[in-house]
Image (tube, coloured by chain):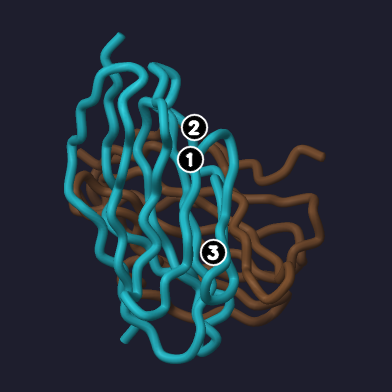
Chain colours: A brown, B cyan
Amino acid sequence: NAGVTQTPKFQVLKTGQSMTLQCAQDMNHEYMSWYRQDPGMGLRLIHYSVGAGITDQGEVPNGYNVSRSTTEDFPLRLLSAAPSQTSVYFCASSYSKAGAYEQYFGPGTRLTVT
Amino acid sequence: GDSVTQMEGPVTLSEEAFLTINCTYTATGYPSLFWYVQYPGEGLQLLLKATKADDKGSNKGFEATYRKETTSFHLEKGSVQVSDSAVYFCALSGYSSASKIIFGSGTRLSIRP
């Protein structure tokens, strides 16, 4: 299994540009999430999905869209990039094991908005 | 709402020293508790977990015990190695939001040879 994969690894955007960060998992996990990681702030939840066709907002959803057309894929779209969106983005998938939802993380996408 | 508080870093220790990273939580019901580790340039990996009170999670020499009376889940290791240098995150998954995990802000650990 490849686990959780993310592309690209690095991206530089100009303010106002749009792009999609790709995330895929091959573990048949129902739950998928997007986080951003900023220095000193830990991980903050952007959007999450509890299954194909179902998405919901997390802690910091503004400026981002998601969709979940298949179990495997959960892309994150930046509609109009802003310097405040410079961050490292992690995708994760999870499943319930003995009542605990273990998260499996991708390697991350480092995004810089100039 | 649910929250996790962990000790601020950075923490710098010498090799073979004893490690404790404190973590306390606020949650309704009976959450599951986790420690994740992030090595430089990588994503987070699950280090250990505990799903109910008095459970002890352990992995790679690290241990943490779920203490409901003190709402704590402190991470310990008896003898750290240089390879343990990483950022450690405490996290919880609550019954009210089982598909979401709440993370602490992370503690950076550096081990001197």
Q: Position of residue B85 (x, y in %)?
A: 36, 26
Quarter residue B11 falls in: top left
Mark linked to residue A9: 2
To which chain does the residue with label 3 belong? Answer: A
Give yes or no for contact between labels 2 and 3 (Cβ–Cβ under 8 Å). no
Residue ID at (68%, 50%)? A24
Q: Give the residue at mark 3.
A: A33
Mark linked to residue A108: 1
Q: CA distance from mark 2 to mark 3?
A: 17 Å
**Image position of B46 (left or right of A39):** right
**Which secondary structure, mark 2?**
loop
Tell me which amino acid carries mark 2.
Lys
Of the image marks 2 and 3, the number of the one nearer the N terminus: 2
**Which secondary structure, mark 3?**
strand
Residue B96 vs residue B57, the one in the foreground:
B57
The answer to whether dots 2 and 3 both sit on one chain is: yes
Q: Is residue B47 above or below residue A32?
A: above
| Mark 2 crowdedness (10 Å alpha carbons): few <14, some 14-19, many ≥20 | some
Residue A61 vs residue B94, the one in the foreground:
B94
Residue ID at (38%, 84%)? B27
Q: CA distance from mark 3 to mark 1?
A: 12 Å
Tell me which amino acid carries mark 1.
Gly
Residue ID at (39%, 57%)? B90
Q: Position of residue A86 (x, y in %)?
A: 26, 45
Quarter residue B55 falls in: bottom right
Give yes or no for contact between labels 1 and 2 (Cβ–Cβ under 8 Å). yes
**Image position of B4 (left or right of B97):** left
Q: Position of residue B104 (x, y in %)?
A: 31, 60
